[in-house]
């Protein structure tokens, strides 16, 4: 069972899973923060805001995520597809590794069906955190933790 904790209990290097929304002010606002070891892959689930075909990158949560030629890209039915199948406003799940100096290396990209209300997600290690300002950075994405957010640890 998960325990409620305070934001100041979280530390740089801890693995977290965040669920929230990317708002009109270009910020990811976390509505739920879960601190626990949850596998090796770093994950980004979000809406594609732009597709750059020249450098094979997707803009998600106002960050550019490069998709290299070895990334496994799958459609809604899990069939392999090419980069050209990825479109603006599509929801995708990126799995891979985030290295601060290099960025996010997506090893797998999965298309996800769009719903009326879409929750975006991040899973990775906390790079920076400021509990007083309720901010952190995960997978290169700046995050604001809502004052109403549930912060849980297992």
Image: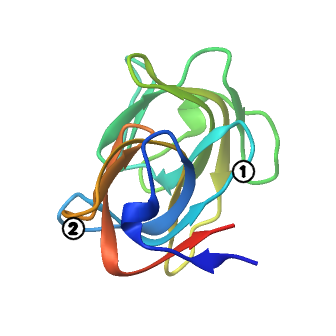
- The residue that appears at 39% across and 67% down in the rendered structure is 7
Could you say which is closer to the camera, residue 88 or residue 18?
18
Q: Is residue 126 above or below residue 31?
A: above
**First along the sequence among labels 2 and 1:** 2
Label 2 sits on a secondary structure element that is: loop
Q: Which residue in the protein does label 1 denote?
A: 38
Q: Measured from the top left, where is residue 26 in percent x and y? A: 22, 58
- In which quadrant will I find the N terminus? bottom right
Asked if labels 1 and 2 touch by Cβ distance under 8 angstroms, the answer is no
For mark 1, does the 10 Å Cα neighbourhood hold few (<14), some (14 to 19), or many (20 or more) residues? Answer: few
Colouring style: rainbow
Question: How far is disc 2 from disc 1 in space, using C-alphas?
Answer: 30 Å
- In which quadrant will I find the C terminus? bottom right
Q: Measured from the top left, where is residue 139 in percent x and y? A: 45, 39
Q: Quadrant of residue 24?
A: bottom left
Which of the numbered marks, if any, corresponds to residue 24? Answer: 2
Q: Is residue 88 left or right of residue 113?
A: left
């Amino acid at each position: 069972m998960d325990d409620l904790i305070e934001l100041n209990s979280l530390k740089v290097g801890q693995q977290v899973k965040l669920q929230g929304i990317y708002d009109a002010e270009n910020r990811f606002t976390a509505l739920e923060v879960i601190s626990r070891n949850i596998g090796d892959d770093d994950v980004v689930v979000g809406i594609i805001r732009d597709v750059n075909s020249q450098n094979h990158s997707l803009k998600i949560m106002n960050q550019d995520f490069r998709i290299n030629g070895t990334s496994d890209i799958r459609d809604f039915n899990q069939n392999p597809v090419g980069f050209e199948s990825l479109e603006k406003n599509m929801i995708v799940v990126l799995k891979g590794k985030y290295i601060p100096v290099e960025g996010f290396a997506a090893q797998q990209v999965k298309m996800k069906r769009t719903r009326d209300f879409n929750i975006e997600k991040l899973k990775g290690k906390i790079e920076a955190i400021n509990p007083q300002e309720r901010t952190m950075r995960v997978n290169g994405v700046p995050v604001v933790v809502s004052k109403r957010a549930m912060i849980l640890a297992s």
